[in-house]
Amino acid sequence: MRDFGYSNNEQMAVGYFSSPKFQNYPVVGVSWNQANAFCDWMTKQKINSYQAKNKMAEGGKCRLPTEAEWSYAASLDIAGNEKKKSSKNSKSSDDENGNVEAQGKIFPVFVNDSKKGQAGLYNMADNVSEWMITSYYEGGENFQNRFNPDIQFGTPQSQSKFERRKVLRGGSWKDSPSMVTTGNRSYEDMDATHSYIGFRVVINLPE
């Protein structure tokens, strides 16, 4: 309702978090800090608890993905779609840049409505943009390489706007067709909340 003040979407805003029919829709309106808090809860209450109960090796962790991890998963989806296009009986609405055919969405959609990529992930290019654990820096490519594929600085207590910027990847339901792509990259303050930003998690488990 705050993002689109002239829209009659009060029922959607209330029902999205209370109605069971939205159970398999992406979470939205969650800041980077809140997403990290969920990861901490998931680690302690679910993963570590399960490991202890089943006498498994300790050290599992839930976290937000790095931008490098997200990009790699997205590249697998693009490669998978290219493979499908080479088949005579296959049709794909994705191109080599990860663009997805515009569907005229006015809200987030059920996650299984999108094609599943080669990595087994849904909606890498559309539905909602996603928080990365990676900090946003315009010259980041000068510091990123195969030995150091991620940049992180700043804390939730940081006062500097520069240090509070976190990367967003992927297009969202509100974007124009040219922006509905896995190449869509932007940033927001770690406390920002919007109806078109969500997150997915990575779970590290010990061998």
Image: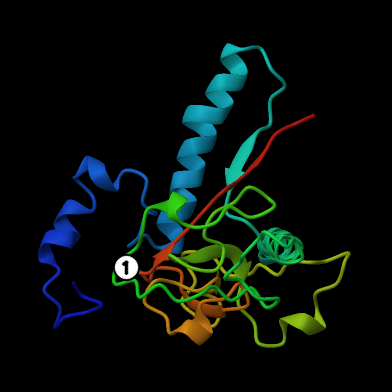
Q: Residue furthest right?
A: 147
From what the image shows, is residue 9 above or below residue 53? below
Task: Residue 199 in the image: state x and y as whole percent.
Answer: 48, 57
In the rendered image, which quarter contains the C terminus? top right
From what the image shows, is residue 119 above or below residue 132? above
Task: Residue 4 in the image: state x and y as whole percent.
Answer: 22, 79
Q: How many numbered tags mark residues here? A: 1
The quarter of the displayed image where residue 3 is located: bottom left
* Residue at the (52%, 86%) spot, across then down: 178
Task: Report the front residue among 23 and 177.
Answer: 177
Task: Report the front residue among 76 and 91.
Answer: 91
In the rendered image, which quarter contains the N terminus? bottom left
The secondary structure type at the circle numbered 1 is loop
The quarter of the displayed image where residue 167 is located: bottom right
Residue 190 shown left or right of residue 122 in the figure: left
* Residue at the (54%, 80%) spot, across then down: 186
Task: Tell me the amino acid under the disc marked 1.
Answer: Ser
Q: Residues within 10 Å of mark 1 (few under 14, many from 20)?
A: many
From what the image shows, is residue 181 above or below residue 32? below
Task: Name the residue carrying label 1.
Answer: 195
* Residue at the (68%, 50%) spot, across then down: 119
Q: Name the colouring of the figure.
A: rainbow
Task: Residue 28 in the image: state x and y as whole percent.
Answer: 35, 60
Residue 99 shown left or right of residue 22 in the figure: right
Residue 188 shown left or right of residue 23 in the figure: right
Task: Residue 87 in the image: state x and y as whole percent.
Answer: 74, 61
The quarter of the displayed image where residue 13 is located: bottom left
* Residue at the (28%, 48%) spot, across then down: 22
